[in-house]
Image: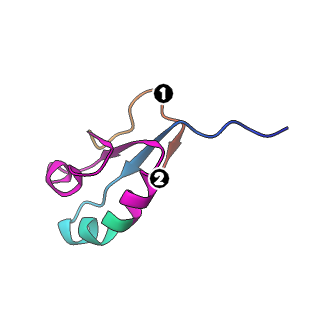
């Protein structure tokens, strides 16, 4: 039996801006075709704001199926 795909992912952004910039291509790829919430420091909204995803607090919200 095939499992249903995970519908909502939480991605914890790195604490340091430089690491966040390096992680941007991965965050962008993960957000393709998925509901993704990125949590982390306040600069996350500026760095990832143009991607098709939600920006949230550093901790995963209730109802998350996968956190990376």
Q: Which secondary structure lies at badge 2?
A: loop
Q: Is residue 15 magenta?
A: no
Query: For the point 20% across and 52% down, which residue is it?
Result: 44
**Of residues 6 and 62, the one drawn nearer to the viewer in this rendering:** 6
Question: x and y percent of residue 9 in the render?
Answer: 47, 42
Which residue is under mark 1? Answer: 63
**Residue density around tag 2, few if under 14, some if 14–19, many if 20 or more, within 10 Å:** few
Question: x and y percent of residue 3 in the render?
Answer: 74, 38
Q: Is residue 61 left or right of residue 14?
A: right
Q: Is residue 18 left or right of residue 6?
A: left
Query: For the point 30% across and 72% down, which residue is it?
Result: 22
Q: Earlier in the sequence, mark 2 or mark 1?
A: 1
Question: x and y percent of residue 30 in the render?
Answer: 45, 55
Query: Which of the numbered marks, if any, corresponds to residue 55?
Result: none
- Vertical placement of 34 versus 15: above or below? above
Which residue is under mark 2? Answer: 68
* Outermost residue toward the right in this view: 1
- The boundaries of the magenta stretch are 26-55
* Outermost residue toward the front in this view: 33
**Of residues 24 and 10, the one drawn nearer to the viewer in this rendering:** 24
Query: For the point 43% across and 27% down, which residue is it?
Result: 62
């Amino acid at each position: 039996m095939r499992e249903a795909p995970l519908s909502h992912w939480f991605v914890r952004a790195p604490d340091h801006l430089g690491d966040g910039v390096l992680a941007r291509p991965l965050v962008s790829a993960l957000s393709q075709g998925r509901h993704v919430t990125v949590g982390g420091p306040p600069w996350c909204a500026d760095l990832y704001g143009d991607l098709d995803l939600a920006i949230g607090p550093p901790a995963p919200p209730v109802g998350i199926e996968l956190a990376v």
